[in-house]
Amino acid sequence: MVDEMRKRTEQIREAELTRLLTRVPQLSPPARVAVATCIDRIVHALLQPALTRVIVQSESAHTAEHAEALLVLFALEPDTAGRCSR
């Protein structure tokens, strides 16, 4: 599940960055790198704590309930093992 969350986040990040850079084509290469770096840092800062909690919670007695909540919250597909995967 963690891998799926990372993959989905990366897809969204990449699509939004492409959208922004298309709308502002006059940005210089260094400005483009700065914008991409800023977006990467924001995404990481928002996602990493949540992913860490998912990994910790995946070892609790309520793993199935947490996994189900995350599947719904992030609109993810259940993995083939039916549990939180790293």
Image (cartoon, helix red, strand yellow):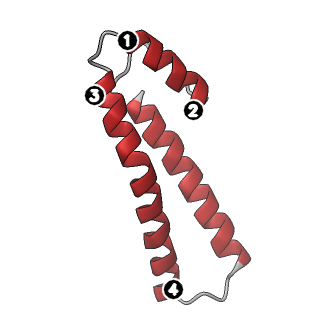
Disc 3 element: helix
Disc 1 element: loop
N-terminal of the pair, mark 4 or mark 1, is: 4
Say which of marks 3 and 4 sits in front.
Answer: 3
Say which of marks 4 and 1 sits in front.
Answer: 1
The dot on residue 62 is: 1
> Circle 2 sits on which residue?
74
Q: Are the residues tagged 2 and 1 within 8 Å (C-beta)? A: no
Alpha carbons under labels 1 and 3: distance apart: 11 Å
Given the image, on which type of amino acid does mark 1 rest? His
Mark 4 surroundings within 10 Å by alpha-carbon count, few (fewer than 14), some (14 through 19), many (20 or more) = few
Alpha carbons under labels 4 and 1: distance apart: 45 Å
N-terminal of the pair, mark 2 or mark 1, is: 1
Disc 2 element: loop
Which residue is at a point 46% across and 62% down the rendered structure image?
42
Which quadrant of the structure image shows residue 59? top left
Say which of marks 2 and 3 sits in front.
Answer: 3
Q: Are the residues tagged 2 and 3 within 8 Å (C-beta)? A: no
Which residue is at a point 59% across and 65% down the rendered structure image?
17
> Circle 4 sits on which residue?
31
> Circle 3 sits on which residue?
56
Which sits in the foreground, 30 or 2?
Answer: 2
